[in-house]
Image: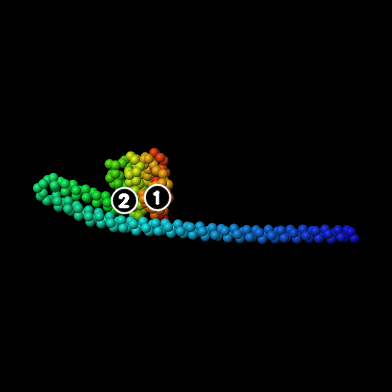
Amino acid sequence: MFNLIYLFKIKEVTLNINLLILIIVTLAIIVFFILVAYKTFVNRIIKEKEAQSLAEIQHQKKLILESTKVQEEERKRIAISVHDDIGNRLNILSLWLNNLDIEDESTSNVIAGQISELIDSTRNISHSLYPVNLEKLGLILYIEELITNLSARINISLFVSSKYIQKDLFTEVQIYRIIQEFTTNVIKHSSADKIDIGIKDFNDFTGIVIFDNGQGFDYEKVKKGMGIKNIESRLQSMDAQFKWESITNKGSRLIFKIQKKQ
């Protein structure tokens, strides 16, 4: 009798243990599925936020591109007007005055000198607004013309790989304007006497580096200035990757690469 009761108790304990194990396993499975569901939910939220962030970034890039294109079109219209209309009128006026019989030679020389300066100023204004002849000359020749114009103020060297391939007009205009803005800032603010420009085509992108030997700058302090803003806005309009490097009293460097369009 005692053995029978003992056996029943053992069976009861065994059943209780099995039931407890079953409950623990069931709870573990439930917790596991809850955790999986929670992780899936969190991942979905993260992906949705990433998608929204990416969409916002793309939207901002599109706005920058459209804004840059509108500005360039307006600059182009004004530059062509200055270059073709006012410039041609000044040239005609110069020819007309040269054919006039002015008794006072000194007066004639003063007038001729003033008109020559006006023609040069008109050309410079036109070029600063928009590189009117870039489409005809191409980027490299136009940069070389810029270098020639600045040669009296600073020494500039251009290095271009033999494999350079001409880009679309919008891209080449932006590259030129970046180089123009960089050189202008260097001449105005850096106390440099040398600027180097390197342009090289790779399989998937075009790499460009511009650097000077001036006093350098603190990016955090100058990044709100119009010069840096204009350069970065143009880089963003091309969706270019870029970075600034600057060391005090050793100069500054801008490196950027433009992915080739498929």
Q: Which comes before the other along the chain, label 2 or label 1?
A: 2
In the rendering, at what x and y percent does residue 36 appear? Answer: 62, 59
Q: Residue at x 39, y 50 (%)?
A: 224
**Dot 1, crowdedness within 10 Å: few (<14), some or many (≥20)?**
few
Task: Classify 110 as above or below 21.
Answer: above
In the rendering, at what x and y percent does residue 65 appear? Answer: 38, 57
Q: Is residue 3 left or right of residue 154?
A: right
Q: Is residue 106 left or right of residue 228?
A: left
Task: Classify 70 as above or below 199.
Answer: below
The residues bearing labels 2 and 1 have C-alpha atoms spaced at a distance of 32 Å
Mark 1 residue element: loop
Give the image's coloring scheme. rainbow
Identify the amino acid type marked 2.
Gly
In the rendering, at what x and y percent does residue 114 appear? Answer: 19, 48
In the rendering, at what x and y percent does residue 172 appear? Answer: 34, 52
Q: Residue furthest top?
A: 249
Q: Is residue 101 left or right of residue 15?
A: left
Q: Which residue is mark 2?
A: 138
State which mark lies toward you, 2 or 1: 1
Q: Which residue is mark 1?
A: 224
Return the residue nearer the eye: 222 or 174.
222
Q: Residue at x 15, y 46 (%)?
A: 109
The image quarter containing residue 77 is: bottom left
